[in-house]
Amino acid sequence: MTTETQVHRIWIKASPEKIWAAIVEPEFNQRYGYAAPGHYELRPGGSYRSTPNAGMIEYHKANDLPPLPEAIVDGEVLEVDPPRRLVQTWRLLMDPRTAAEPFTTVTWEITESKTQPGTCKLTVTHELAGAPVTADVTAGNLGESAGGGWAWILSDLKSLVETGKTFND
């Protein structure tokens, strides 16, 4: 069984500002992971939504799958302290099973290394109480065809920030 709290840490050779931009700017966040742009209203109470990309929409059409919703992930910004901390609610809407689960909470924390200049630790903590299907998705437990959850997304983010290339480049 997947834990109700998942903590993922990676170290990235980049400034906090560059990592922050990779997280919150749709021009940047649509390039890695599932390539679905994430749109933030960066204020407490602001909205968060991720929209399907053209490839996702086409895949659903070509495989006679139900159309995707306008937002495939939604939530609300709870805390924002650029470029150090972002707390948001998060709900995956692409699958009826995850859409029926409660909102979960994701905390992004960027900390500069004291021993490795120019390097930051990015910690993503996902609180998943009452959302076991979402926990399996974000843990990457659904097989490679469904992606690799947070570990995969964060690894791709690191590749993009450090090299300018993603797994698909």
Image (cartoon, rainbow, N blue to C red):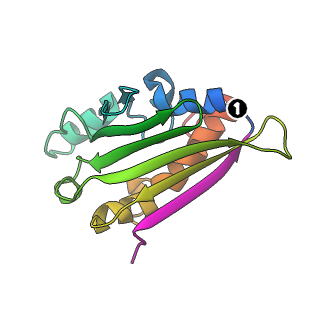
In the rendered image, residue 159, in percent from the top left (x then y), is placed at: 65, 39
Amino acid at circle 1:
Thr
In the rendered image, residue 82, in percent from the top left (x then y), is placed at: 55, 29
In front: 97, or 127? 127
State the residue lying farthest toward the bottom.
Answer: 1
Residue 148 shows in this picture: no
- Label 1 sits on residue: 163
Q: Residue at x 71, y 30 (%)?
A: 15
State the residue lying farthest toward the top.
Answer: 27
Q: Is residue 111 magenta?
A: no
Q: Residue at x 20, y 52 (%)?
A: 99
Q: Picture quarter containing residue 75? A: top left
Q: Is residue 11 above or below residue 76?
A: below
Quarter holding the C terminus? top right
Q: Is residue 141 above or below residue 50?
A: below
Q: Secondary structure at mark 1?
A: helix
Q: Picture quarter containing residue 20? A: top right
Residue 45 shows in this picture: yes
In the rendered image, residue 83, in percent from the top left (x then y), is placed at: 59, 31
Q: Is residue 141 above or below residue 78?
A: below
Q: Residue at x 41, y 27 (%)?
A: 42
Quarter holding the N terminus? bottom left
Magenta span dominant secondary structure: strand
Q: Is residue 39 above or below residue 109?
A: above
Q: Picture quarter containing residue 111? A: top right
Q: Residue at x 55, y 26 (%)?
A: 21
Query: Badge 1: how crowded within 10 Å, few (<14), some, or many (20+)?
Result: few
Q: Is residue 150 left or right of residue 36?
A: right
Magenta residues (range): 1-12
In front: 92, or 148? 92
